Amino acid sequence: MNPEGTERNTRPGTPGEGADRAAGTDPGTAPVSRAGRAADAGTDTGGGRQHSAVVVGGGLAGITAALRLAESGVRVTLLEGRPRLGGLAFSFRRGDLTVDNGQHVYLRCCTAYRWFLDRVDGARLAPLQDRLDVPVLDVAHPRGPRLGRIRRDNLPVPLHLARSLAGYPHLSLAERASVGRAALALKKLDPADPALDGIDFATWLGRHGQSPRTVEALWDLVGIPTLNAPAPQASMGLAAMVFKTGLLSEPGAADIGWAHVPLGELHDTRAAKELDALGVRTLLRTKAERISRTDEGRWAVDVPGERIEADAVVLAVPQHETHGLLPEGALDDPDRLLDIATAPILNLHVVYDRKVLKRPFFTALGSPVQWVFDRTDSSGLTGGGQYLAVSQSAAQDEIDEPVAALRAKYLPELERLLPAARGAGVRDFFVTRERTATFAPAPGVGRLRPGARTRAPGLYLAGAWTATGWPATMEGAVRSGFSAAGAALSALGRRHDHPLQEAV
């Protein structure tokens, strides 16, 4: 699961029965231009020559930067190499189904992504829980399967989770007490402290009395899907940010939201409508080949068959692609971008011939299955049955497993977790793989992540991998777009108000 998302895309298609839906496999096709309204594009709200910008990359970071720049009167061209917008959080067609490449969720504390949803008129299509409530099923207990819940009350932090923790059946009484003590210690930390980035989450948890079972049944239950790494492989700085913000900032901060429509409706269709209305010229299936300075000191972005000149450029593509496009001298040590490793996410999609899960989602212990979501309604499934999406984060050991092997492993596991699945017919089973789904949140990654500004005036960086303070999420991507656009507008002398001042 990738709660707040990241960027990359595949072309819609209808792979055959049991096919492996691999990401990043767009066939080469002619560029497509979707120009905004000419009248809007020519408007100058600054009283002089209209400034222009090119945004390279149409994921959430690039869309956000383009929206913010265009709203401030800048003429924007948005380049996207794939046939749609949205980056990693996208949808495709498989027969009669509309399938999300993977399950993406967000939290109430994800204020930047919530701004994005409001901006594209999509908040009602991705509602939040009234209160945090996560069913946790342990199928390895000696006395048989046990269901626990992580849920909150309306009491002040940290009492909002006290009753849930006190009754959590997957930990002993002593382990529950130790969690409370660790949470109080965590609340005192500053996630931006560089010293925290230098150690791993597991080491810190061990120092604060957390048993291996406590790590498995609570800390990793939340940490693996949000960080895309288990505790021993995660920076303590990023872990502190996740838990302090999500669980210890305010009672409702961790309430979960997710799209009840295909992600493409939010991140492509609705986003494109807003960009068009602002006069943004959107070029799909168009990749930047080179970025250079003009003789007049402006920027030139070369794309197939065209050179686009602009006052500012925002690079909102993955770190390795950014490295290849950076002009000389833009960063002190550009090769550090290549040291930001990536981590995979695996998603298994199962269509049953009958309903096997009553809840919208659950997470599991004592099983290789991590999180399971009901995607029946959003996919448009007809003819009865149920469509479940199984989201497997930090999937380095399984990302290249054949579909047949994954099917043989996970269908029995789902039957073990869901008695109603035993004997149910499987109408379809397929896999989506994101081999570079997120940046790896390893200790020390913080010093590698660059900010929005570069040493080259007018050139800015965006993407969940930049220095947002957040792990690789949809929230981090949108925040990076805010930062890049804000830096560009300030340099251009454009008055602008940050829509989310605390997100800077």
Image: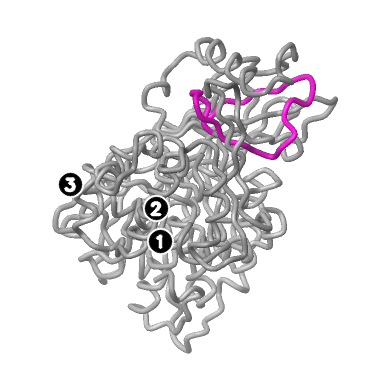
Q: CA distance from mark 1 to mark 3?
A: 20 Å
Question: Mark 2 or mark 1, which has the lower sequence index?
Answer: 2
Front label number (1 vs 3): 1
Helix, strand or loop at disc 2?
Answer: loop
Q: Residue at x 32, y 63 (%)?
A: 460
Front label number (3 vs 2): 2
Viewer-side residue, 212 vs 482: 212
Q: Is residue 359 magenta?
A: yes
Classify residue 396 by image quadrant.
Answer: top left
Pointers 2 and 1 in contact (C-beta within 8 Å): yes
Q: CA distance from mark 2 to mark 1?
A: 6 Å
- Locate the C terminus by quadrant: bottom left
Q: Residues within 10 Å of mark 1 (few under 14, many from 20)?
A: many
Task: Give the residues drawn in magenta, as a range.
Answer: 347-370
Helix, strand or loop at disc 3?
Answer: helix
Question: Mark 3 or mark 2, which has the lower sequence index?
Answer: 3
What is the three-letter code of the residue carrying label 1?
A: Ser
Q: Which residue lies under the disc numbered 1?
A: 480
**Position in image of residue 150 (x %, y %):** 57, 46
Q: Which residue lies under the disc numbered 2?
A: 464
From what the image shows, is residue 299 above or below residue 498?
above
- Whether residue 141 sits left or right of residue 477 in the image: it is right
Q: Is residue 349 magenta?
A: yes
Q: Which residue lies under the disc numbered 3?
A: 335
Viewer-side residue, 108 vs 487: 108
Q: Residues within 10 Å of mark 3 (few under 14, many from 20)?
A: few
**Position in image of residue 109 (x %, y %):** 52, 62
Q: Residues within 10 Å of mark 2 (few under 14, many from 20)?
A: many
What is the three-letter code of the residue carrying label 2?
A: Ala
Q: Residue at x 56, y 51 (%)?
A: 33
Question: Mark 1 or mark 3, which has the lower sequence index?
Answer: 3
